[in-house]
Image (cartoon, rainbow, N blue to C red):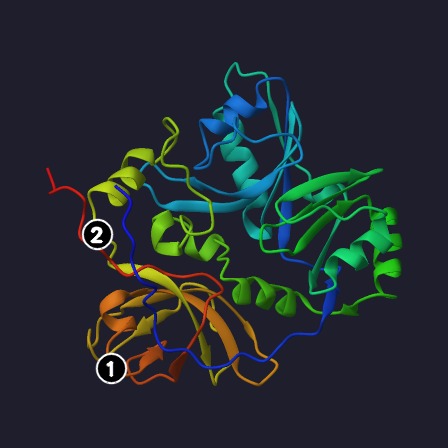
Amino acid sequence: MNRTASPSAPASSSTPPDPVTVYTAAPDFGVLGFDGPEAAAFLHGQLSSDVTGMAPGVAGWTSYNSAKGRMLSTLLLWRADADSFRAFVAADLAAALANRLAMFVLRAKVKVADLTGEGQSVGVGGAGAADAVRAALGVAPSAGQGARAGDACVVAAPDGRYYIHAPAARARDITTKLAAHAEAITTDAWRRLAIRAGIPAVTRATQDLFVPQTANWDLIGGVNFRKGCYPGQEIVARMQYLGRLKERLFAFHVDAPPAAPATPVYSPVFGEQACGTVVNAAPSPEGGSDLLAVVQWAAATADGALRLGAPDGPPLAARALPYAVPAPAAPDRPRL
């Protein structure tokens, strides 16, 4: 049943703009490769999105979950052609994730590889990102698309940021060309672009903590509720159709240095018990830091400041996300 829920999130304050076009040669993502005639079927049985339904050239968000339905990794998946996929994942998870997925290949005709060390990655973002990428590579895919540019691959995330992977010499040439059209930024600044887009990245510190819906993965197209089985599918589906979400991902600013992933969030509503968890954080150009945190609805919408790290920690100021977060609604059917 379709339900219409009005966007309901904490009150938000203004967010200062980032530079128009930026790039970094040190993004915090790794690259996995999946190649073979059964790559699509294999990934379809492992990830939360409709992989077999992806046309060549399409890219989108997906997740790899535990049997309990909790996210072990977030991925930007690109179907390069009928038998080849590339996935961009948190750098500190790439090797372990490739090894784990390879264990489930069995007799399937697919090769899983961690390609991170075989080249260099570059990230590009901002309002002029497409023009800068086109100047550097000769091609700039639209959001949610990817392309090969010689020995490089360039993938545009649905939010418009570009993920590029190329052999080291080519990557150096790309960054040299980008420098004429964009401002160089740090890894922290690249991470902030994702925070402003409301796109959480699961890292080693936050593995196995969040059901996809609590991280807003359903709101950005990272979950397909009509596909067949994959790890955790039953739990994810039950939460969607029979459950009631008690927490969601929200954006905040705090006058403090960036908190480490998995730092707890507190509220007077919950007293000494944590009511949320930081997912990602990065320095803000206005001072302090910006962050994404999964927080209990009862705390996020109640009067009284949310606090970072301790019940008396620095207060969190809500920021607007670029998409609507629906208020919790009663389940369509009673629990069985």
Asked which secondary structure carries label 1, the reply is loop
- The N terminus sits in image quarter: top left
Q: Residue at x 79, y 44 (%)?
A: 166
Picture coordinates of residue 15, whole percent (x, y): 53, 78
- Looking at the rendered image, the quarter that the C terminus falls into is top left
Tag 1 residue: 303
Q: Which mark is residue 68?
A: none
Mark 1 burial class by Cα count in 10 Å: few <14, some 14-19, many 20+: few
Do labels 2 and 1 touch, CB within 8 Å? no
Q: CA distance from mark 2 to mark 1?
A: 22 Å
Splitting the image into 4 quarters, where does residue 127 fall?
Answer: bottom right
Q: Position of residue 293 (x, y in %)?
A: 40, 66
- Report the side of 106 relative to 115 (left or right): left
* The label number, if any, that marks residue 244 in the structure image: 2
Q: Nearer the viewer, residue 296 or 6?
A: 6
Residue 258 in view of the camera: no
**Where's residue 93, x and y in %?**
54, 47
Q: In the rendered image of this protein, does residue 77 appear above or below residue 46?
A: below
Mark 2 Cα within 10 Å, few/some/many (few <14, many 20+)? some
Q: Residue at x 62, y 52 (%)?
A: 29
The three-letter code of the residue at mark 2 reads Arg
Residue in the image at 72% along x and 46% along y: 141
Residue 144 located left or right of residue 265: right
Amino acid marked by disc 1: Asp
Say which of 260 and 235 sits in front.
235
Quarter location, residue 237: top left
**In percent of the image, x 48 and y 83: which residue is there?**
256
